[in-house]
Amino acid sequence: HHEVVPLAPFARELVRALDGSRDREALTARLRETVEAGDLGAEGPDGEPLSTEALAEALPALVERTIAELTAAGLILPG
């Protein structure tokens, strides 16, 4: 039994990067590059785009939280 699971853009991009070749630091760096290239939005709680400094602060926690959410949903295995 399969079903479609909608993912937020950040989670979708993170899943694309989960090929087993990157640790969390490398995942964070990859997502930072994607945001900085304009291919993925990163907004603060106020809806405004994050500055480079705010992005550097927020991304590690966002990666961790998204991995935890994907794991809790049974979409990825704990690791």
Image: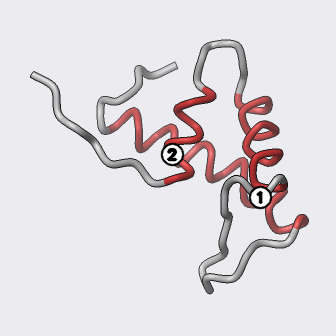
Circle 1 packing at 10 Å, graded few (<14), some (14-19), many (20+), is few
- Residue 55 left/right relative to 15: right
Q: Which residue corresponds to the image point at 23% horizontal and 38% vertical from the top-left?
A: 4
Answer above or below: position of 26 versus 44.
Answer: above
Residue sitting nearer the eye, 21 or 25 = 21
**Residue type of the residue flagged with mark 2:** Ala
Up/down of 45 relative to 78, above or below = below
Q: Secondary structure at mark 2?
A: helix
Give residue 3's position: percent from left, percent from top: 17, 34
Which dot marks residue 53? none
Q: Residue furthest top?
A: 21
Which image quarter: residue 63? top right
Residue sticking out furthest to the right: 53
- Amino acid type of the residue tagged 1 in the rendering: Gly
Image location of residue 64, percent across then percent down: 59, 43
Q: Is residue 64 left or right of residue 22?
A: left
Between residues 37 and 74, which one lies in front from this camera angle?
37
Residue positioned 66% across, 75% down in the render: 44
Q: Residue at x 72, y 20 (%)?
A: 22
Marks 1 and 2, Cα distance to the nearest angstrom?
Answer: 16 Å
Looking at the rendering, which quadrant does residue 70 occupy?
A: top left
> Is residue 33 depicted above or below 50 in this figure?
above
Q: Quadrant of the N terminus?
A: top left
- Residue shown at 79%/48% (left/top)? 32
Question: Where's residue 42, x and y in %?
Answer: 68, 64
Between marks 1 and 2 in the image, the one whose residue lies nearer the viewer: 1
Q: Position of residue 77 (x, y in %)?
A: 41, 20
Residue 46 shown left or right of residue 5 in the figure = right
Q: Which residue is mark 1?
A: 38
Q: Which residue is mark 2?
A: 11
